[in-house]
Amino acid sequence: MTTLAPKPGFDWKKVIWGRPDSVVSPLCSYCSAAFRDDDVPLMMWTTDGHAAKFCVACQREWWGLMNFDDD
């Protein structure tokens, strides 16, 4: 099994978690950037249902993920 973890320097205190009974925000939970129509955010949930999602830039910078459009 692979474990996904943020890179060093990531600050969990900056993550804005959406409430389980709320509509998911159209903004990145870390940097507050707006999502484009074709973005596929990284999403995660706590065990009690709070949600966070990360934009393409934060996925790359903090999680080490790459998109097919990346060079």
Image (cartoon, rainbow, N blue to C red):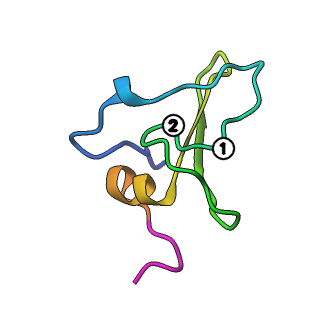
Q: Which residue is mark 2?
A: 29
As drawn, the residue found furthest toward the bottom would be 71
Q: Which residue is mark 1?
A: 26
- Of the residues shown, which amino acid type is indicated by label 2? Ser
Q: Which residues are magenta?
A: 66-71
- Position of residue 8 measured from the top left corner of the image (x, y, whole percent): 22, 42
Which residue is at a point 66% across and 44% down the rendered structure image?
26
- Of the residues shown, which amino acid type is indicated by label 1? Pro
Report if the CB atoms under discs 2 and 1 are less than 8 Å apart. no
Q: Would residue 47 be found to the left or right of residue 11 on screen?
A: right
Q: Is 41 drawn above or below residue 5 in the view shown?
A: below
As drawn, the residue found furthest toward the left would be 9
Q: Nearer the viewer, residue 48 or 16?
A: 16
Which residue is at a point 57% across and 51% down the rendered structure image?
34
Q: Quadrant of residue 70?
A: bottom left
Disc sitting over residue 64 in the figure: none
Distance CA(mark 2)–CA(mark 1): 9 Å
Q: Is 68 drawn above or below residue 28 in the view shown?
A: below
69 magenta-colored: yes
Which residue is at a point 44% across and 68% down the rendered structure image?
66
For label 1, the SS is: loop
Instruction: Give the overall secondary structure of the magenta segment.
Output: loop
Dot 1 alpha-carbon crowd within 10 angstroms: few under 14, some 14 to 19, many 20 or more: few
Q: Where does the C terminus fall, quadrant-wise?
A: bottom left
- Position of residue 37 measured from the top left corner of the image (x, y, whole percent): 70, 63
- Position of residue 6 measured from the top left corner of the image (x, y, whole percent): 35, 43
